[in-house]
Amino acid sequence: MNSSEYFKGRGAQINPNNKFFVNQYVQEHVEGLDEEFLGTAKTQFISTHPKSIISKSNSPDLRFERSINPYQGCEHGCIYCYARNSHEYWGFSAGLDFERKILVKHNAAQLLEQEFRKASYQPDLIMLSGNTDCYQPIERKLGITRSILELMVKYQHPVSIISKNVLMRRDFDLLRELAALNLVSVAVTINSLREEVRQKMEPRTATASARLKLIEGLTGIGVPVMLMMAPIVPGINSDEISDLIRAGADAGAITASYTIVRLNGQIGGIFKDWLYQNYPDRAEKVLHWIEACHGGKINDTDFGRRIKGDGHMAESLQHLFKLSVKKYMNNGTLPSLRRDLFRLPDAGAQLGLF
């Protein structure tokens, strides 16, 4: 694909067939097509009406069991995103569809409040953005994430957020209230300080400098922040580990974590296509190094190894990461958030009438 055909502002450049479909579209005779087979269509926002909003996970790789995703699909277009595969369950492709067909859960806050008010509900940490970014561009207009945070304040419920979008600044008023009660922590994802890498790998995200300023702002209002270097792609951004942790620490992050890229399902083909177009000089080496971290394959489903990898390459990256965290962050950790403050704001209101 030449530069004139490259879809600027998108990560994926292909739309692979949904594995659940029996039939598929193919492009064989271009001269016979009445319209463009794969164009730069605008983003569509599709309303959904789920019956529940809290997702639960028992994965030992994750530091949370409950999560809320106001949106499915993500306009950020990060080429490596593991959530791409989940878009197939909705009848779409993990490629361009993931970035331009966004499913919106308009009733997320209403469903969450119904959960909070159940007599059986037990408070525990809820992660916003366990799958896709809760602060992706459409949130500026819809404010679903903000409505969820308003409930967290109202019910004094612990919440953790992971995002790479500086729109979070809009909600500093709510985050400040939660931080004062030790009810919130935030992970800000940055995987490169080089703008040319970000533009290719994460085309519709904020710059690294803007995200570092976000960390500074969060720290300034008392929110504990973790830097997430996710994912590390050997041969693309792996040389930035130490510099990135140092920059995060200087901005106020108290700890850091990372993942090594894994290319499960359709992501493998999508990533390979992107890699050969953007880094043809090193594509084969990068794929080989990824395989070296995952037992000789680019995909990995084994707990533990799928996140951090193993083998000499992965051990080398992990060693450098740990040394950098020790040097620049003094091996800091995020504080445990309180679970004991949860309350029904109108509890006992009727008794006040007597």
Image: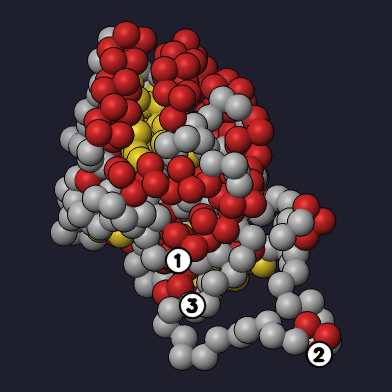
Chain-order first, disc 3 or disc 2 = 3
- Residue at image position (51%, 35%) is 236
Q: CA distance from mark 1 to mark 2?
A: 28 Å
The image quadrant that residue 169 belongs to is top right
Q: CA distance from mark 1 to mark 3?
A: 9 Å
- Residue at image position (17%, 48%) is 60
Task: Decide if residue 293 is on the left or right side of residue 203.
Answer: left
Q: What secondary structure is found at the residue carrying circle 2? A: helix
- Dot 3 corresponds to which residue? 18
| Along the line of sight, the residue nearer the viewer: 106 or 103 | 103
Label 3: few (<14), some (14–19) or many (≥20) C-alpha neighbours in 10 Å = many
Q: Nearer the viewer, mark 3 or mark 2?
A: 2
- Dot 1 corresponds to which residue? 266
Q: Residue 351: tell me if it is visible.
A: no
Chain-order first, disc 1 or disc 2 = 2
- Dot 2 corresponds to which residue? 32
| Along the line of sight, the residue nearer the viewer: 54 or 354 | 54
**Callout 3, which amino acid?**
Asn
**Callout 2, which amino acid?**
Gly
